[in-house]
Image (spheres, helix red, strand yellow):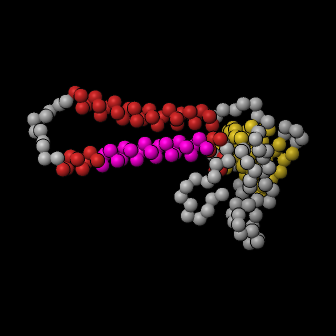
């Protein structure tokens, strides 16, 4: 759940979000190492009294400052690509849910077992629901835990954004286009 003045991520509720949080930590450590080494080199160069005025080129130094950034970028790119392909992976979904964005509400359709469809409107701000202010709806989408879920998302009028931050899901609902996401929920929650 998100809180006021929260700096960190919300609690992960899917394997994809857990991977994203660990990649964020990995990337931050690489960035901190890069910044620390740059600051160290700047202070070392400023405090160094020995200057070679006649140094025009040095092949070894040029190779080093070309190869080291390439390896650092690969060190970030490989886990990033792994997560990118994991988000699109879909293996035998247990349930498929059609999600349709309208202006001011969402429509959901379950067609796998029995055809169920309903609209989900945001609850009025004047009602006595202060805990989920501007987040609660009259008909909530119910999703099963520990099952592969496929969501087909589209819109009828304008571009909408469908986001479930604890699941690591954010996709645009675009009129005339069906976007697909898949997720697995680890534990129950609202």
| Residue 72: image location, x then y, percent | 40, 35
Whether residue 27 is in magenta: the answer is yes
Residue 11 sits above or below residue 114 on the image: below
| Residue 179: image location, x then y, percent | 68, 39
Magenta residues (range): 18-39
Whether residue 32 can be seen here = yes
Q: Which secondary structure is most common in the magenta stretch? A: helix
Q: Nearer the viewer, residue 112 or 155?
A: 112
Question: At 24% from the left edge and 32% from the top edge, which residue is drawn?
Answer: 61
Question: At 28% from the left edge and 28% from the top edge, which residue is drawn?
Answer: 63
Question: At 76% from the left edge and 39% from the top edge, which residue is drawn?
Answer: 147
User: Which corner quadrant of the image does residue 178 belong to?
Assistant: top right
Dividing the image into 4 quarters, which one contains the C terminus? Answer: bottom right
Residue 97 sits above or below residue 138 on the image: above
Question: At 13% from the left edge and 47% from the top edge, which residue is drawn?
Answer: 49
| Residue 46: image location, x then y, percent | 19, 50
| Residue 66 falls left or right of residue 58 | right
Whether residue 176 can be seen here = no
Q: Residue furthest right?
A: 114
| Residue 103: image location, x then y, percent | 71, 55
């Amino acid at each position: 759940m998100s809180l006021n003045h929260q700096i960190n991520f919300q609690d992960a509720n899917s394997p994809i979000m857990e991977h994203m949080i660990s990649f964020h930590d990995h990337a931050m450590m690489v960035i901190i190492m890069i910044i620390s080494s740059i600051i160290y080199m700047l202070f070392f160069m400023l405090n160094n009294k020995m200057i070679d005025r006649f140094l025009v080129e040095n092949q070894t130094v040029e190779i080093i400052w070309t190869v080291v950034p390439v390896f650092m970028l690969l060190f970030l790119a490989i886990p990033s690509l792994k997560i990118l392909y994991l988000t699109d992976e879909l293996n035998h979904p247990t349930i498929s849910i059609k999600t349709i964005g309208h202006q001011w509400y969402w429509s959901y359709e379950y067609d796998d077992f029995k055809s169920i469809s309903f609209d989900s409107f945001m609850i009025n701000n004047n009602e006595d629901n202060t805990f989920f202010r501007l987040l609660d709806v009259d008909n909530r989408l119910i999703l099963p835990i520990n099952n592969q879920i496929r969501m087909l998302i589209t819109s009828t009028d304008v571009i909408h954004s469908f986001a479930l931050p604890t699941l690591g899901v954010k996709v645009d609902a675009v009129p005339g286009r069906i976007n697909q996401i898949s997720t697995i929920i680890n534990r129950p929650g609202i």
